[in-house]
Image: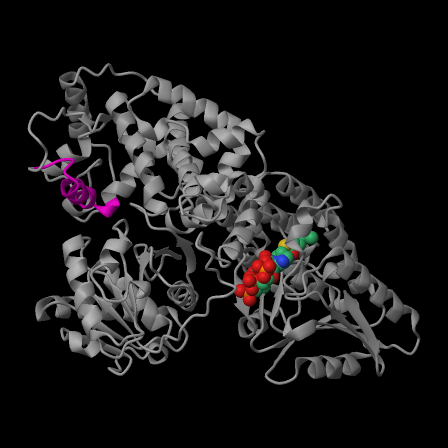
Amino acid sequence: MAQYARGSAVAVIRLRNPPVNALSRAVLQALEDGLKKADADPSVKAVMICGENGKFSAGADIRGFSAPKRLGGALGPIVSLIESSEKPVVAAIEGVALGGGLEVALGCHYRVAHVKARMGLPEVTLGLLPGAEGTQRLPRLIGVPAALDMITTGKHIPATEALKLGLVDEIVEENTIEAAIRLANKVIGQPLGPRRLSLKPVPKVPNMEAFLDEALAKVKRQARGCLAPELCFQAVRAATRSPFAEGVRRERELFQVLLSSGQAQALQYAFFAERAVRRWATPGGASWSSAAPQPVRRAAVIGLGTMGRGIVTSLVKANIPLVALEQDLENLNKGRKAVMLLLEREAMKMEGGAQVLDFHNPARLQFTVDFDLLRDVDLVIEAVFENMALKKEIFHKLSKICKPGALLCTNTSALNIDEIASATNRPQQVIGTHFFSPAHVMRLLEIIYGRHTSPTAIATAMQLATALKKVGVVVGNCFGFVGNRMMFPYVQQAVFLLEEGSRPDAVDQVLEDFGFKIGPFRMSDLAGLDVGWRSRKDQGLTGPSLPAGTPARQRHGQRYSPLPDLLCERGRFGQKTGKGWYLYEKAGGRTATPDPWLLNFLSQYRDTHGIRTRFIDQEEILERCLFSLINEGFAILAEGIASGPEHLDVIYINGYGWPKHRGGPMFYASTVGLPRVLAKLQKYSEAHPDVPGLQPSAFLKKLAAVGNPPLKEWMSYLSQQSSKL
Ligand code: TC6
């Protein structure tokens, strides 16, 4: 609601809807009532709008967009009402003014902000545009280039920047409300015409059309299939070409297109899913509501390879003092150099730079080869080579050296947490923390609890994720956990498609057109084919331990493709060796071109194995790759490895480059319709009976059979008995 109060000549309207003063229908109604009351009261000479609890407003209530009586059109007229007030209206911006919240402030005649406040129009990140006349007012206030940047990226800007841009009139370090009331008293009686943004012309940019063409090309490049950025652009462009009222009409039209596009629903689902996974629970009954984290005052990272370096950088950025350990001086020096380089680069991006990060101070970042220095740390992250024997040796050592309460984390992407924990005297404090490369950039932290992991350990790992500004997702222990386990059948299908007649660039193109940042073959070249090869050798699927007489294209009675192994045997590890699924300009090069050698090799391979080459269309490529991944997701849910489809979606969006505007794989399945996903899997599994990844999971079948229920009801169809734990 909004609370109206009048003490002096300035009436105060306080937006009140905890926790972020979202603009619900009730709040908007109360705001309108407050404005009308102030207008009608002759003793009121000015109005001040602020938000309860130190936050102006986080914008329209996102839940309201899917309500039957949609919020969409209600806010614009209220912003107009504010602007047309004959009495000056001042916004007192504390905390955040985002989306519709900032649009309300733009309707005000003056804006005062606290120095720590943040402002932005993040609608684009929810698949929308600032549909309360924000696309028309903001360019008039701060100019087209700055407005386009804010509206098409959705970035939040600090008050200091807002002042420089002219978005706010004043910033204060003390009491914003008092400062706003002071300003309101000061401007009583002054003409309001020049303060009404709708009456201002859009500031001219030399060669506006050329500027807009370039800006549009940039927006399109970055959007990769997401509609909202381009429609945001079009709305701002309308401001440069048409009078205010016409611009508003165009803005409304474009808003309606987005609202019904499907992408808005997907992005809003992703917004809430990210928040839902914070409320973790395990089948054993542990949960976020009862478990308390323990403090991490000092941490350690073991291993300064690619992952360890990124993890160290992440911890330093989170201001957590730490010890970085390597096995010998040579590796330590190499690792130290690389970490320092990363940190220098990070510091350059930050205000205050190296001084803020303080990484030259040994009390904050110490490099060592001495395990004894790990005695008093609260948390260790082991990030050594993916090898069970090595990890067990390290964990055994850690359990002897570290203080009793220390949490022992392993950065593994697939190995068994229970087996690692069995090497210690404290399995309850052992937990998987699966970072994604580059670890200081990627937002996902997959947190894996083992059979004995305590709720405190899970809560501490989740708190660590928050401290590192990552999204922590708690999952159970199985080979590959959630992310990689779902990835296996996807990559497997991609390779099978090559065997049957497709090409790496054709498969990648289809998945990149779908919205993936990078297709499976480009990804494999980037990550290095040798990583999977080593793992397959360890599993006895290839290499010297493979029993003589094993059929080339079969393992344990299932279809197997030796293609990636054959490439590795020829030294084709991907980018690092200059060739893999593609050819690169040099070892370490990044520009992939289709390699005639590989195409010839594929054709010989098909001849050798008597495979009839056939044309594979885009639909089959997409469905076989995505539906097998989704199918594995249903198996994961049925086994209780993740507590809901949101977990899988958050993992895929933040760790695997899944296009956010498609809401994650499970959300995507819900939009395709589960009966259709099932029918397609049935069709493909009939054609390929030796591929278990294509055989529909029992849970998917059940959901399709009960009539395709909405995603949020899926878990209620899992009977207790079918849950593994
Ligand atoms: C718009 O304005 C369009 C206008 C055009 C035409 C009409 N609505 O993130 P937190 C909830 S579109 C409803 O955990 P933080 C959130 O779900 C909107 N609920 O906190 C969570 O609930 P839970 C444009 C909202 O401190 C709780 O509040 N605005 C909204 O880490 C706390 O949130 C945006 O896109 C909302 N607008 O971050 C801003 N906002 O406890 C979206 C939050 O039940 N919001 N909630 O899980 C944010 O970016 C962040 O929430 C934050 C606070 C920076 C405001």
Position of residue 608 relative to residue 269, above or below, is above
Q: Residue at x 26, y 79 (%)?
A: 376
Regarding ligand 1, which quadrant of the image does it lie in?
A: bottom right
Kindly tell me whether residue 185 is visible in this rendering. yes
Q: Residue at x 69, y 51 (%)?
A: 64
Picture coordinates of residue 488 (x, y %)? 30, 38
User: Is 570 situated left or right of 51 in this image?
Assistant: left
Kindly tell me whether residue 203 is visible in this rendering. no
Q: What secondary structure characterizes most of the magenta part?
A: helix
Q: Residue at x 34, y 30 (%)?
A: 693
| Count of picture labels | 0
Picture coordinates of residue 491 (x, y %)? 30, 36
Q: Quadrant of the N terminus?
A: bottom right
Picture coordinates of residue 76 (x, y %)? 74, 54
Q: Residue at x 62, y 68 (%)?
A: 167
Q: Name the one closer to the observer, 549 or 262.
A: 549
Position of residue 685 relative to residue 123, above or below, is above
Which stretch is magenta?
Answer: 526-543
Picture coordinates of residue 498 (x, y %)? 26, 26
Position of residue 662 relative to residue 369, above or below, is above
* Magenta region includes residue 542: yes
* Magenta region includes residue 231: no
User: Is 59 situated left or right of 223 in this image?
Assistant: right
Color theme of the render: one colour
User: Is 453 situated left or right of 713 in this image?
Assistant: left
- Residue 141 is drawn in which quadrant? bottom right
Q: Name the one closer to the observer, 382 or 191.
A: 382
